[in-house]
Amino acid sequence: MRVTAYAYKLERGATVLRSEVLLLLWQENLTFDGSSGSFDFLELFSGKGEVTKLWRDHGFRCCSVDLDYADCMDFEKHSTFALCLWAILNEVPDAFNVLAPVCGSWSTVSRGSTLRNYVNPMGHQPYNSVAFGNRMTSKCVLLILVMLACNCIFALEQPSQSLMPRHKRLEWLLNRVAYVYEVHFWAMHYGKECPKRTMMLSNLRTISTLDRGVLSNAEKVAKHKVETTRIAVHTSIYNHLVLDPVAPVPRSYTRAFGERLLELYQHGRTETRYDLRTRPKIPKGKSDKELFEELQLGDIWYESKCHETFLYLFESKHLRTEWNALLG
Ligand SMILES: C[S@@+](CC[C@H](N)C(=O)[O-])C[C@H]1O[C@@H](n2cnc3c(N)ncnc32)[C@H](O)[C@@H]1O
């Protein structure tokens, strides 16, 4: 089966993910043969979903996931992680995946409370917001591994100064697993109401041309439509910088940005994408049962709580009974 081969192609370090993929394949209420539809595009943490809407308008089969849509789309839930895995395993080769994970705990402004910095990018892990940021990033890396195994394209977006690429799992992915292009650009060049210097990491070569160059001060002033902060200078001993609660930074992508992504995708999707490692060879003629039996536990990516999704799938009432002896 095609997807079983994908499961085997997964990075050696993430065997828990491999077994999760196999468990997912063995759920009798799920299909992986395109009969419930195949996807060309997945937007994870899609928010307003402008990019998804645009791609759908162009006839692509899309799927988007965000907590804004429903509680059951909380990325913290095992079912949501399983849903993302299912969606990716149902993608056509060269499908495009945009991930815009929550940047709160990775951005420059939160460094005082997360205690993240260049030498300690994982921050102060007992803090909930830091643990959430680390867990979410680990899980995104696991999903990207599945995307790569399925020969798909990913693009991960963050604010330009985000420390996320220094997360140990993402750094490993970028340095050891996939050949990835990094681009920094001004979102204002794509119609955003604030400048927002943005970073994108992708295995699609043409992504490098997202950068439309310098944003001049005059252009910044002319196009800037949101005020995010105001300074109140007190006559007392202290000066205060007061955050304005009525003007949050608009975090959504613009349609123009979606259009540009589509254009770059169409130019680059058939180009060769490179790996930085040698993928393990798929032993020919072995059944997925035999592959499962051979898996070593290895590194379980504890911080991602991926093993909990494994248990969630393992305990599912839809798991095919013929595997019971093997799993018991
Ligand atoms: C950086 S914004 C992405 C915005 C999006 N690119 C857009 O164009 O609207 C991060 C998104 O993550 C979503 N989010 C936050 N926590 C989440 C969670 N636990 N599970 C799923 N989505 C979550 C938010 O609702 C928000 O839309």
Image (tube, rainbow, N blue to C red):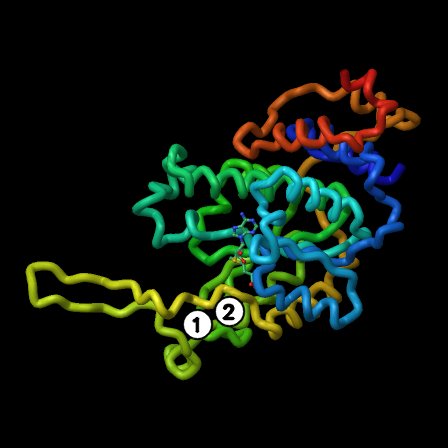
Residue 194's mark?
A: 1
In the depicted structure, whether residue 224 falls above or below residue 177: below
Which one is in front, 322 or 183? 322
Residue 269 picture quarter: bottom right
Three-letter residue code for mark 1:
Cys
Assign a secondary structure to mark 1: loop
In the depicted structure, whether residue 34 falls above or below residue 208: above
Marks 1 and 2 close (CB-CB < 8 Å): yes
Q: Horizontal placement of 38 versus 310: left or right?
A: right
User: Gap in Å between the C-alphas at discs 1 and 2?
Assistant: 8 Å
Which one is in front, 326 or 93? 326
Ligand 1 falls in quadrant = bottom right
Assign a secondary structure to mark 2: helix
Q: Horizontal placement of 11 versus 230: left or right?
A: right
Residue 284 picture quarter: top right
Which residue is depicted at the point 64% across and 69% down? Answer: 258
Which part of the image, by quadrant, shows the C terminus? top right
Mark closer to the chain start, 1 or 2: 2
Which residue is depicted at the point 58% across and 50% down? Answer: 71
Residue 151's mark?
A: none
Image x and y of residue 25, in percent: 81, 35
Image x and y of residue 28, in percent: 84, 35
Residue 187's mark?
A: 2
Three-letter residue code for mark 2:
Ala
